[in-house]
Image (cartoon, rainbow, N blue to C red):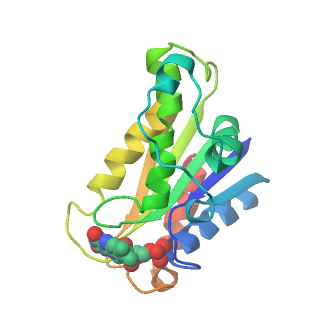
């Protein structure tokens, strides 16, 4: 069982990093030790240019960290967890660039009718934090996560979203976060 963590925050050791570390710790405690965490901001990713190559040939024209590191990990993963802040009601740019490049899996699935994840039961989870409190704060992330996971034949299981988290490290003082993550991992 291979677990892939995708960290969307460019901020070092911030709230997303903390949420991811709790999630990974819980997975390890449950015996999952084949785990890789990738930081979107540390990868070199060409933004999708909508050339359509993947729609006819099933492959991307670019060769970069998406094709060499991210895509192979996505294909191998059984559990995928995204941990991200809200940036202007969306995912931060580096993570969004990775998500857009998943168009290659969307094309293989919907245009080329490839069934490459047949008999695999892949699961996806979103962890998120944002500074404000509005009820729509996480709508953008949840919608994008839904269609990202769908393109990669991953069942979007659930999300944990934390409002009012702004300062670096503020997540650490959240009273319920340990129990939230532990019960989420139990349910996976
Ligand atoms: C460029 C930028 C845009 C942001 N946009 C929003 C926003 O639209 N809504 C919000 O509530 N918080 C926003 N925030 C605050 C972050 O979502 C919040 O501080 C989050 O907890 C940071 O997580 P991190 O420590 O993992 O980076 C923004 C922060 C930055 C730097």
Q: Quadrant of the C terminus?
A: top right
State the image quarter where residue 79 is shown. Answer: top right
Q: Is residue 28 above or below residue 167?
A: above
> Which quadrant of the render holds ligand 1?
bottom left
Percent x, y of residue 149: 47, 38
Percent x, y of residue 70: 64, 46
Residue found 50% across the figure and 14% down from its top? 112
State the image quarter where residue 91 is shown. Answer: bottom left
Residue found 50% across the figure and 13% down from its top? 113
Percent x, y of residue 1: 74, 41
Residue 69 visible to an observer of this rendering: yes
Q: Is residue 24 above or below residue 186?
A: below
State the image quarter where residue 17 is shown. Answer: bottom right
Q: Nearer the viewer, residue 49 or 21?
A: 49
Residue 28 in the figure: left or right of residue 131: right
Residue found 42% across the figure and 54% down from its top? 159
Residue found 43% across the figure and 60% down from its top? 93
Residue 135 in the figure: left or right of residue 101: left
Count of residue discs: 0
Residue 152 visible to an observer of this rendering: no
Percent x, y of residue 7: 56, 62
Residue 148 in the figure: left or right of residue 12: left
Q: Residue furthest top?
A: 113
Q: Nearer the viewer, residue 105 or 83?
A: 105
Q: Nearer the viewer, residue 114 or 43?
A: 43
Q: Is residue 16 above or below residue 90?
A: below
Residue 44 in the figure: left or right of residue 163: right
């Amino acid at each position: 069982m291979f677990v892939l963590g995708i960290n969307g925050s460019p901020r070092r050791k911030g709230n997303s990093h903390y949420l991811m570390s709790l999630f990974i710790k819980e997975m390890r405690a449950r015996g999952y030790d084949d785990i890789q965490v990738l930081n979107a901001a540390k990868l070199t990713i060409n933004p999708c240019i909508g050339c359509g190559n993947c729609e006819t040939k099933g492959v991307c024209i670019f060769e970069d960290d998406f094709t060499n590191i991210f895509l192979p990990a996505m294909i191998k993963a059984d559990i995928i967890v995204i941990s991200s802040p809200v940036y202007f009601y969306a995912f931060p740019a580096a993570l969004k660039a990775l998500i857009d490049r998943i168009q290659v899996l969307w094309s293989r699935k919907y245009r080329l009718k490839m069934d490459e994840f047949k008999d695999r039961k892949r699961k996806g989870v979103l962890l998120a934090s944002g500074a404000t409190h509005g009820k729509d704060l996480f709508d953008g992330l949840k919608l994008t996560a839904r269609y990202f996971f769908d393109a990669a034949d991953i069942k979007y299981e659930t999300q944990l979203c934390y409002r009012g988290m702004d300062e670096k490290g503020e997540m650490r003082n959240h009273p319920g976060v340990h129990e939230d993550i532990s019960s989420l991992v139990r349910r996976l």
